[in-house]
Image (cartoon, coloured by chain):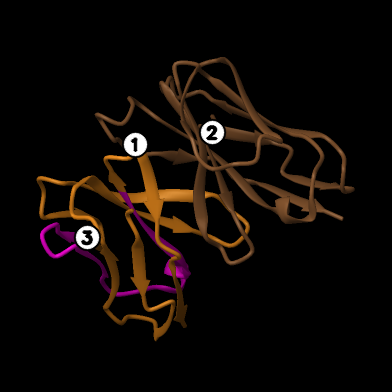
Chain colours: A brown, B orange
């Protein structure tokens, strides 16, 4: 009965590799998000999708590419991983877009460590 | 550009004490303000959401207030328990179509 799930939970990889993180929500929400929480625990939005369409793309290197195959899934692919990409990545979802600004539900996070 | 500040960064209290966490934001044009809880190694759990037209919201021992004009919110926790130990994050949703988070207050409730 998990609301927002992410896989994998932990990811350890070498610099230069390409990796993907998957997110699924079973809440029937229209909007999904990716956040990055850095080593100082500061949480910042990276991307937002509403009904499979990109609506927010913050200043994120183009090595990061989100993909939404359907409105229940939002995956994050990262090319040519760098040491600075090490962080916890959270997926979230909410019903409605910015006009409704409703509660966001977060996944458990994916802890990425780049060596 | 919206900025959210939370004070204090860390707080340690004995069990049973009532406490207040503070959040301030620079741009008062917000849709809502949300308080979240984050446990170590876990995701965020939404505690309370206050719409911009509201002044406060209550859930159990938690009460959150919002003073939009002054750019402030407080989270009041009554009769604190060790299980309340976590990091509490404040976030505002403004016209930029995104949640802007503060850095959080790490709360420790000692038995």
Q: Considering only vertical position in the picture, is A71 above or below A59?
A: above
The residue that appears at 26% across and 78% down in the rendered structure is B18
Q: Considering only vertical position in the picture, is A113 above or below A7?
A: below
Q: Considering only vertical position in the picture, is A26 above or below A110?
A: above
Task: Count neighbours of disc 2 (C-alpha within 10 A) and say few if under 14, some if 14 to 19, many if 20 or more.
Answer: many
Is-magenta flag for residue B83? Answer: yes
Relative image position of residue A9 (x, y in whole percent):
71, 43
Evaluate whether label 2 is on the same chain as label 1: no
Secondary structure under the numbered disc 1 in the rendered image? loop
Q: Which mark is residue B64?
A: 3
Magenta-colored span:
B64-92
| Rendering quarter of residue A55 | top left
Evaluate whether label 3 is on the same chain as label 2: no
Relative image position of residue B73 (x, y in whole percent):
22, 63
The residue that appears at 33% across and 53% down in the rendered structure is B1
Q: Which mark is residue B97?
A: 1
């Amino acid at each position: 009965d998990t609301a927002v799930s992410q896989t994998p939970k932990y990811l350890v990889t070498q610099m230069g590799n390409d990796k993907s993180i998957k997110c699924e929500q079973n809440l029937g929400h229209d909007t999904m998000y990716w956040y990055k929480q850095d080593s100082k625990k500061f949480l910042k939005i990276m991307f937002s999708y509403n009904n499979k369409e990109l609506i927010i793309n913050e200043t994120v290197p183009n090595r990061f590419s989100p993909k939404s195959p359907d409105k229940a899934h939002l995956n994050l692919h990262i090319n040519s991983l760098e040491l600075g990409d090490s962080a916890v990545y959270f997926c979230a979802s909410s019903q409605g877009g910015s006009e409704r600004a409703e509660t966001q539900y977060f996944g458990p996070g994916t802890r990425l460590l780049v060596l | 550009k919206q900025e959210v500040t939370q004070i204090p960064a860390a707080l340690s209290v004995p069990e049973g004490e009532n406490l207040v966490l503070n959040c301030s934001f620079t741009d008062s044009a917000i849709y809502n303000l949300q308080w979240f809880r984050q446990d170590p190694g876990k995701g965020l759990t939404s505690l309370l959401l206050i719409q911009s037209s509201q002044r406060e919201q209550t859930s159990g021992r938690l009460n959150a207030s919002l003073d939009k004009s002054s750019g402030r919110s407080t989270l009041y926790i009554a009769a604190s328990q060790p299980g309340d130990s976590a990091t509490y994050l404040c976030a505002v949703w403004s016209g930029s179509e995104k949640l802007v988070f503060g850095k959080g207050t790490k709360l420790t409730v000692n038995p």
